[in-house]
Amino acid sequence: MTTKTPRATRLAKSLLIAAALGGLSYTQLSAQVSTLRTGRLPNGLTYYISRDAGASEGTAHFFLLQNVGAILEDDKQNGLAHYLEHMAFEATEHFPGGVMNYLRTRGLYSFDARTGTDDTRYSIMDVPTTEKGLTDSVLLILKDWCSGISITEKDTEKQRGIIIEEWRQRGGIDKRLSDSIAGVIYNGSQYSKRNVIGSLDVLKTFKYPDIQAFYKTWYRPDLQCVMIVGDIDPAVYEQKVQKLFASLPAPRNAKARPPYAIDDNAQPLYYRFTDKENRSHSYGLYQRVATPTNRPTAEATKDYLLGQLFNTLAPQYFARLRNRGEEAYIAASVSYSPLVRGYGQFAWDFVPYSGQDKTALQQILAARAQMPYGFFSDDAFEAEKQKLYDGMKEVLSDDKGLGTPQNFIDIYRNNYLYGTPMREFRQQLEDNLEALVELEADDLRAWLKQRAMGDRNLAFVAYTNSPSVPAISEQEFLKELSAYNTPVQAAESSEPAPITKLIDFKLPAGKIAREKKIPSLGATEWTLSNGMKVIYKNLAKELKGEVLFLASAKGGQSIVKPADLPSFSAMQSLIMASGLYKYDRNQLAQWLRNRPMEVNLSITEYIDGMQARSKTDGVDDLFSYLYLVLNKQRFDQHIFDKWLQRKRYIYDSKPQQGREAVDREISELLNPITEANPREDNTFYDKMKLSDLPRLYAEHFGDASQLAGCLVGDISEAEAKRIVTTYLAALPGNPKAPRRTYTIRDHSSRERVIERTFEVDTEGDLGEVELSFLGDKKLTDRERIALGLLEPLLQNRLFDELREKEQGTYSIAVKTNYTDDPVASTSLSIHFITSRAKADHLKARTYEILRSIAAGQIDRDEYKKVHIPQVLDEEAEAKEAGDGMSLGVWIALLNAYAETGKAPDLSKKTATGQEVKVSEVTAQDVSSLLKKLLDEGKRRDIVVKSLAPEAKTWEH
């Protein structure tokens, strides 16, 4: 259950630090976080409390961790651990009106609960510490979760409908697949019998005393941990926790929490999964490995770092094979990742070309056998190690963002569950860096030889859509495995010679033809001799040590003639696929290995664009590479042929019935097939011609005079001039050519209203509703903000009505979007899944809710709940920007000038680039915007229902 995720900036920092820390162990408790207060109460409850004023200024974050998960359920309780998580947000001892209701009335929306196989975590985030009594109330909620959940028959029945809808939402092909293969992945252990969401039969039939029994047995202090992080005084909150939670009764004659293990399987296990909705004929080879939770620090650190390095190096092996045109598979991947508590897994997945199943398997097994030898080179290892090192150093350089609340919680969680020691973030990262520096390529080879070889704990799965389709049998797999099941030295590679000088020819001379200062932007505009326009601005503060170049031209797919659309589609997909100039992709990958840079091209409906970014000291390499990308693109015959073969195979493999077929029918209803919007089928592929691709590429990126962009970052004006004249001015361009424009195209149906119900022969009881409202009027800044407020407001209203009152669906997705370039386009979409019988009723209720909001029926408190957070976010962005504006705003302003030649009036802009503040927008603005969209826009009303039970012909 999740109501709102933390702000993106904090989440991004959390993920970055998590990548640096990973699943690492730490030193002894004596070297812990400096502000940490931790202890264990006489009743067995553990607590961790620490101050984090940096990322949590003015707020605190509260967590309750239960060492209890789905693994502890017996067969009659299958699904009740997760069910109990939902019950925790209903009535409790001190919150009889419901915990969720209380939190939302207090403006708290960042609360979450997640039931896992092994443990369960509850959280209430972003709690203001200045609101009198609020944090005390949140602590009381945590205590009620420990022992005061009021599991009544009424609340149980309310949640039954919601959870069955959640089960329905999860119950597609992916769930059927994971449930089916669990027996071989987990070797028939308890883990193979518990999938968290549980059994539908149990969910439909259990009685509320059954969940009370699970609660009483497992929710108890010796299996509970309270964690608090934020802008608080830890000593004060320690006293609060000790006083409040000490009254929880210690369990008498408590049932021991059993440890669960997965027995080894000495011989490989085999399973064939068959489902008519299976999307691809494919295979998976899985090897389970033990990862004890009590490993010494050095061992755990090394294991995690080597796993990370393996996951970056492994895809490069398959890329080299594909670049040589030798692969027998459409797609192949391998990864190492956690599985369940105490176990990890190597997963090899591959989709063979038609008729090449055995050859593809042999290539996968050969790659596995070569892992300790020829899977990667020493140079490749060192390059990836350097990237990981640089990422850790970047985290260390950010003192303010070093240690988010989530990072603290992860450390406390690991200490509580596994006894993993703790220490300060900076020291952890510095020690991890030292461990990383010591690693060598042979360490990874030895690790792979020890962990990922042999027959032990292997499982092989064939994924098909029909029993009649030929697939690799168990006997065939075992025969091939025996031929490749010992480490072998790879054959000498025929890799081409490394690139010594990327551009080994003289570039055409170019120059800056005109220069113009733009005082309002503090920037300079250069018009080059080839007609390209470049706006330069020094943004050393925003891009410290980096350079960024962005450019675009009008055109995109809109300028492509209908007859060229098939070849254009191929061209888009094959950019960079054959390499550049005289270099193939393997040579370029080797050259790029130690050069941290990023170059991307994009062709949208109306724009041809590019982005290039690198460290300042690598700027010549960046623009040399960009020059070749734009002017020396290659399209090789064997690469084209392989790609086309993959496209045909994927098309031929598409189900011709069932849900996917209905989805295609819906797509063509909403966007009819025309000459300008052709169906992508074998006839479409027949029209693709390799000879067209260079011409089509040149039409989009071959004339520099069409491009306008900006060069920003930590680079002086003199150095920027040198780069621009040396590389960008050397590109071919016709300065006398008229500026290209785009052709406005709208492939959507011209019907103002489309209302259709489709029936599909699929497993289960399904009613899926998708409502869309589309406008084509330009919005004011006020209306744009109102549209952004409409999304959470409508989300909350539908949540209350369709889920909480009707118990008709588990979740509702509301999305709004607006763009005004090249034409105005506004959209509002609503999507939810329910049962076949409830679909029409819930759809009708949705229309009633939309009409009520459009009529101005928005409660003041309801509006404040969505308005105030956005006001605070805007203020936070303004505070973070200080006297200046963010990098994103600067880029938007510079690009706007490059495209229009007009300098914006910055005096009217907020820190986010808007001329109207969020605080100025009212509930009436939201109502007016929605009314305008409902009255003037197109409406799309699509319902998909499963067939009535008596009409089904479903088979596995």
Image: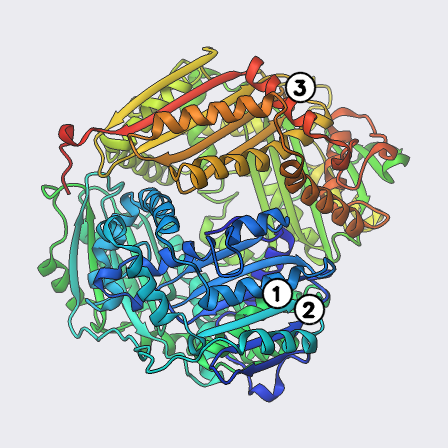
Q: CA distance from mark 3 to mark 2?
A: 44 Å
Outermost residue toward the top in this view? 751
Q: Are marks 2 and 1 in contact (CB under 8 Å)?
A: yes
CA separation in Å, label 1 and label 3: 41 Å
Mark nearer the N terminus (3 vs 2)? 2
> In the rendered view, does 128 fall on the left or right side of 669?
right
Helix, strand or loop at label 2? It is: loop
Q: Relative to residue 530, is residue 241 drawn left or right?
A: left
The kind of residue on which mark 1 rests is Pro
Return the residue at label 1: 405
Q: Which residue lies at the image location 65% right of the left edge and 63% below the top edge?
A: 135
Q: Earlier in the sequence, mark 2 or mark 1?
A: 2
Q: Is the C terminus in the top left, top right, bottom left or bottom right quadrant?
A: top left
Up the image or down, 809 lies above or below 704; here it is: below
Q: In the image, is residue 285 above or below residue 155?
A: below
Q: Amino acid at mark 2?
A: Asp
Whichever of callouts 1 and 3 sits on the residue coming sooner in the sequence is 1
Identity of the amino acid at label 3? Answer: Lys
- Marks 2 and 1 sit apart, C-alpha to C-alpha, by 7 Å
Element carrying mark 1 = helix
* Residue annotated with mark 2: 52
Q: Nearer the viewer, mark 3 or mark 2?
A: 2
> Which of the two residues, 803 or 154, is positioned nearer the viewer here?
154
Q: Position of residue 40 (x, y in %)?
A: 52, 83
Q: Residues within 10 Å of mark 1 (few under 14, many from 20)?
A: many
The quarter of the displayed image where residue 186 is located: bottom left
Give the residue pinned by disc 3: 778
Residue shown at the point (35%, 25%) measured from the top left: 840
| Residue 332 coordinates in the image, percent (x, y) | 33, 52
Crowding around mark 3 (Cα neighbors within 10 Å: few <14, some 14 to 19, many 20+) is some
